[in-house]
Image (cartoon, rainbow, N blue to C red):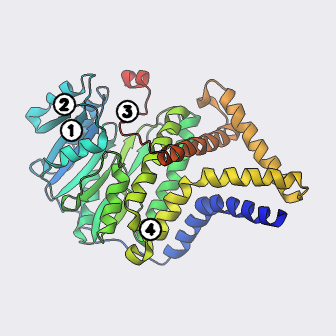
Amino acid sequence: MIEFLAVITMCSLLVPAYVYVGYPAMLWLLTRRRTFRPARQSDMTPPLTLIISCYNEAAVIHDKLVNALSLDYPVEQLQILVVSDGSDDGTDEIVRTFADQGVQLIRQEGRLGKTMGLNLAMEQARGELVVFSDANAMYAPDALRMLVRHFADPAVGYAVGAALYTDSDTGASARSENLYWRYELAIKQMETRLHSVVGGDGAIYAIRRALWQPLQSKDINDFVNPLQIIALGYRGVFDPEARCFEETAGHFEGEIARKERIVNRSIRGLMRVKVTMNPFRVGVFAWQVVSHKLLRWLIPVFLLVAAVGSVLLAMAGVLVFQWLAIFMVACLLLAAAGMLVRDKNRLPGLVSVPYYFAMVNLYALRGILRALSGETQVTWASARPAQKREQE
């Protein structure tokens, strides 16, 4: 019995180690000598539609539209659509002041969610390519050109840019999120060299309009939509030079709650396009999506099993698990200490990292349980606190 419990516990511990360390290491080994990149054509400027999603973004929408209108892309080739999901804070009125510059407002009544808003906007999109963006994501001047150049390769169905944080040094929450995101960006680059980047980024990603398939209200668009494109036989690329800039939520609670929403909706989305987990249909991409997404979402489950098994084995006198149990308890105590601090942005690294890791996995577990119970969050709001948005 002890041997069986030890095997289960060790396997449960190895899964997180594989996801966070083993998978990136294997990507690095597999891509050391592979330089798969689609042909670039920097002067390629086909008709393009920029869709900006928003809900109550009066604090940033003016700056976003000024930014969009100043991008280095031919005006006659650029269509700008703003889809407002029932905003009631003056967002729509601000957007209408840009009507004489070609900006079109699409208002969705009834708070139906971002995904349904995108379905509505796509009915009016005229561009050969479509770029999806959020209201708080400010693009570098050449961001659209950097995305577009990859579509010179007919095998490319979507291209993802790099969303960079401008407030990465303003507090423990921002530092933790920025560290995690830099790790993610490195993985995206290696995935692209091997086959395709897994998923898009709601702040900055582009697709061929002809490949768009209307989404269900519970779908998370920047994950399900790229998976649908992979299932059609295309690939997706990540370009670190296609940059946009945004702020983190600025506090742990906002970032952690956002992770719960993402996990909650993404698990359902993956099951809807489960063909992308079939290696006979999509090749090595199946390994990528299972390793990068599915197993990562399930890490809280494996950690829970590992924790219970370690305690039981420690109580049975197995030395290695006694030390492991002590380590786990120490991490939990540090995380608990973080919970007791009112201003979590002042947490030292020794406390903020265990706190962030523990809370992200706890809320991910909540997202999984909600998804299994059939509960999926459809609507969204900015993760940035209202007071902060008003001050911007």
Q: Nearer the viewer, residue 50 or 147?
A: 50
**Which of the marked residues, 2 or 4, is nearer the chain's N terminus?**
2
Q: Are marks 1 and 4 in contact (CB under 8 Å)?
A: no
According to the image, label 3 marks what residue? Answer: 381
Query: Could you say which disc has been placed on residue 364 in the image?
Result: none
Q: Are marks 2 and 1 in contact (CB under 8 Å)?
A: yes
Query: Within 10 Å of the Cα at label 2, are there few (<14), some (14-19), or many (20+) other Cα atoms?
Result: many
Query: Could you say which disc has been placed on residue 95 in the image?
Result: 2
**Which of the marked residues, 2 or 1, is nearer the chain's N terminus?**
1
Tell me residue 389's x, y (percent).
38, 25
Q: Amino acid at mark 4?
A: Met
Location of residue 147 (image quadrant): bottom left
Distance between the alpha carbons at the discs numbered 3 and 4: 31 Å
Between circles 1 and 4, the one closer to the viewer is: 4
Q: Amino acid at mark 3?
A: Ala
**Which of the marked residues, 3 or 1, is nearer the chain's N terminus?**
1
Tell me residue 133's x, y (percent).
29, 45
Distance between the alpha carbons at the discs numbered 2 and 1: 8 Å
Image quarter in which the C terminus is found? top left
Query: Could you say which disc has been placed on residue 82 in the image?
Result: 1
According to the image, label 4 marks what residue? Answer: 277
Q: Amino acid at mark 2?
A: Val
Tell me residue 365's x, y (percent).
57, 45
Residue 141 can be seen in this image? no
Q: Amino acid at mark 1?
A: Val
